[in-house]
Image (cartoon, coloured by chain):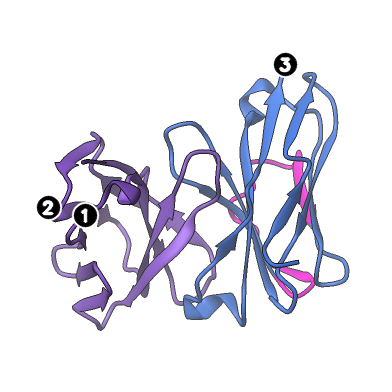
Chain colours: A blue, B purple
């Protein structure tokens, strides 16, 4: 596709449920990033992949959050036992080349997660 | 801990004027700084990158300065237009990770 796509665009779930959020990066981009953004705040880093491996997962808030990128393209962010505080917009971004070089990150439209 | 501060209040200016947005940071030595634009309901869009050894970068009506001594970046939009109205985010990056640390953003409103 032309840009980064994320599905679903909106997800409403109940406290305690499991959710999966999907990101399709721009074709050929080797670095993929997950952020989450609360209302009125800037994006908060969660994890980034270089290829299939997680190069930096220092932003994952706890072990309920997990992300995979098994074939170095599509990535899934998984949240177990969701809590109301997990409600936010989850943004995915990708970049060409190694993430260390400051290459611009191309963001998707985000998935708005609401935990009731 | 690392902290980034942007103008917390919205910036309202008249069309044609220069908008200046500020990004200050503490407890961090970034290798580079980026500026992004974000419109409501959409993901951020990259505007400019400036590295630690650069003082100033320009792109069309945009200018960014980076002062590593003051730990501050200024972002200027000259000849502002109503279409420039959006939230502008600064983001810091390090030399050993691809992650970006974002400020909270400043909302700019350009009135015709």
Tag 3 residue: A116
The answer to whether residue B34 of the structure is visible from this angle is yes
Q: For the residues labelled 3 and 1, say whether their Cβ atoms are less than 8 Å apart.
A: no
Q: For the residues labelled 2 and 3, say whether their Cβ atoms are less than 8 Å apart.
A: no
Neighbor class of circle 2 (other Cα within 10 Å; few <14, some 14-19, many 20+) is: few
On the picture, is A97 further left or further right than A69? left
Chain identity of mark 2: B
On the picture, is B86 further left or further right than A109? left
Q: Earlier in the sequence, mark 1 or mark 2?
A: 2
Circle 3: element type = loop
Determine whether B70 is above or below B43 in the image: below
Assess whether residue A53 is covered by the magenta stretch: yes
* Residue A18 rendering spot, x and y as whole percentages: 85, 32
Report, in whole angstroms, how far the alpha carbon at label 1 lies from the one at label 2.
Answer: 6 Å
Neighbor class of circle 3 (other Cα within 10 Å; few <14, some 14-19, many 20+) is: few
- Is B44 or A17 nearer to us in this picture? B44
- Is A101 or A108 nearer to us in this picture? A108
Tag 1 residue: B80
In the drawing, what numbered circle is on residue B17? 2
Work out whether disc 2 and disc 3 sit on a shared chain.
no
């Amino acid at each position: 596709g032309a840009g980064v796509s994320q599905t679903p665009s909106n997800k409403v779930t109940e406290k305690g449920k499991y959710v999966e959020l999907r990101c399709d990066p721009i074709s050929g981009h080797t670095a993929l990033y997950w952020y989450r953004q609360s209302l009125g705040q800037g994006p908060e880093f969660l994890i980034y992949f270089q290829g299939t491996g997680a190069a930096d997962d220092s932003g994952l808030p706890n072990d309920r959050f997990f992300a995979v990128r098994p074939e170095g393209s599509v990535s899934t962010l998984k949240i177990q036992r969701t809590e109301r505080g997990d409600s936010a917009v989850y943004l995915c971004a990708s970049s060409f080349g190694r993430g260390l070089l400051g290459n611009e990150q191309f963001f998707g439209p985000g998935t708005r997660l609401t935990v009731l | 801990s690392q902290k980034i501060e942007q103008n917390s209040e919205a910036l309202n200016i008249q069309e044609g004027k220069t908008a200046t947005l500020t990004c200050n940071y503490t407890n961090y030595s970034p290798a580079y700084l980026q500026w992004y634009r974000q419109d409501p309901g959409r993901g951020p869009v990259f505007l400019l990158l400036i590295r630690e050894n650069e003082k100033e970068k320009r792109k069309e009506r945009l200018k960014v300065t980076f002062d590593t001594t003051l730990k501050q970046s200024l972002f200027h939009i000259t000849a502002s237009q109503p279409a420039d109205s959006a939230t502008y985010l600064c983001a810091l990056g390090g030399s050993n990770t691809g992650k970006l640390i974002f400020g909270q953003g400043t909302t700019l409103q350009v009135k015709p």
